[in-house]
Image (cartoon, grey):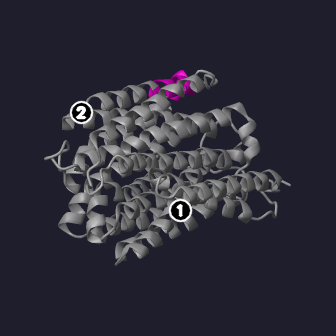
Amino acid sequence: MTATLAPSIRIGKAAVGALGMLAVATGALESVVTPTLPLLQRELDMSPAEGALLSIVLLITGALVTPVAGRLGDRYGGKQVLIRLMAVVCAGGLVSALAPNLPVLLLGQVLQGAMVGALPLSFILVREHLPEGESKVAIGVVSGLFVGGGMAGTLSAGPVAEGLSRHWMFALPTIALIGATLLVNRLMPHDPPRRSDDTGVDWPGLALLSGTLVTLMLVLALAPDIGSHPLVLGALVVVLAAFVTGWITVERRAVAPMVDLRMLARPTMWKSCVLTFVICVGTSVAVYLVPQLFAVPSREYGFGASATEIGFFLLPGAVAASLAGPMSGIGTRRFGSRAVVTTGLVIMAVALTALAAVHSEIWHLVIGKVMISLANGLCVTALVTGIATSVDRSDTGIATGLVLVTRVIGFAVGAQLGGAILTAATPPGSDVPAESAFVTGFVIAGAVTALSLLVARTMSKGVKE
């Protein structure tokens, strides 16, 4: 039974601005690990495998939290769930800032992973309190500001970690996040419960999805060593198949599934999920490989860049990503989502192929990263905006949450794939992979991205205004 809803209160620019500030702070906190991973590995005496785990654990947690947050937001109201979720993220930021060792830092990253659920909750609030046309632009702006926050974190993490300490690179964005959360709590009106059913969270589905993601990451991590551990890898593949089968069975039978797989029967949903996954795999391979190539010693074929230099080199890409969200929102309104997604896919495929062919100068990597970041922002924002405005209002959180879960899984798979390729191409006794490994990674990502254009051609054009 659905509850009778009170008339929505229209929000002003201040409330949307508060959501934007929250997006900036969460983006900054999410991005500090990438440019400083070599520094963290040295200070905490981490192995490459532990470093890879640190780089994806936040994404895995986010993939688990997002659908739960979206469902609870649809049912109880976006603001109530958002504020509680951000309290967990703030606690995680403080734990990461105070972490004396790797296990505590991993705990902090697990808690910070709850931030991934903030975007669909923000979409619920925007769509609840703004007219259709304005909500599209606002969703694009909030998405773009989240990426813009990532830009700030990427640029500042290295100097802060090297000038002060690694603790402060977590502490500063966490302080900003606490302030933004208090501001959202003050400015955003309370929205009434959207659903009055008493069904609880799908805990069996959550547990099985957790097992699926963890096992998948282990399979990808061990794949380069298949010759040394064939039985272990084979057993993990069997376990992965069992988790996937069990999860699908549970979700199909659950009264209130964590991820409503019936939505995937809709062409708009499954096409958006396929495209989101492919786009994010291609992006993530580049996000992982480009900083690694910057860090390769200059006596080999790399550039020997420090954490501060890596952050500086990644800045133009972060700027492009921050602009892509609003550009995508405007482009979707004018030309439709299919045109924007197709444009982004072409740009990304060209950039990845170019990086495979030419990567001998810093500016080659910088321009390639700019194109890939721009393409990713255009595609993902167009897909999320299209989904958020094409389903019933009561399903906004569930639908966008499903796309964002796909986004997170794509990023995690891409990072692990890039790591597996480099690991397999690293000669015994050396810590520098063969240059051909980078070429292979870029070529694979570019080919998969190009093939996804076949799916994009079958999309509906989307609403043009």
Q: Quadrant of the C terminus?
A: top right
Image quarter in which the N terminus is found: bottom right
Q: Which residues are magenta?
A: 332-345
Q: Position of residue 155 (x, y in %)?
A: 26, 52
Residue 291 is situated, as x and y percent measured from the top left of the image, at 29, 48
Q: Nearer the viewer, residue 309 or 446?
A: 446
Mark 2 neighbour class, 10 Å CA radius: few under 14, some 14 to 19, many 20 or more: some
Q: Circle 1 sits on which residue? A: 114
Q: Is residue 114 above or below residue 421?
A: below
User: What mark, if any, has residue 393 been given in the picture?
Assistant: none
Is 393 positioned to the left or the right of 17 in the image? right
* Main SS of residues in magenta: helix
| Residue at mark 1 to residue at mark 2: CA–CA distance | 35 Å
Q: Amino acid at mark 1?
A: Ala
User: Which residue is identified by label 2?
Assistant: 364
Which of 20 and 328 lies nearest the eye of the viewer? 328
Amino acid at circle 2:
His
The residue shown at (35%, 60%) is: 48
Residue at image point 38% right, 48% down: 424
Query: Residue 206 placed where, x, y %?
Result: 67, 61
Residue 291 or residue 246, whichever sits in front: 246
SS type, badge 2:
helix
For mark 1, give the secondary structure: helix
| Residue 78 is one of the magenta-drawn residues | no
In the image, residue 339 lies in the stretch drawn in magenta: yes
Query: Can residue 243 be seen here?
Result: yes
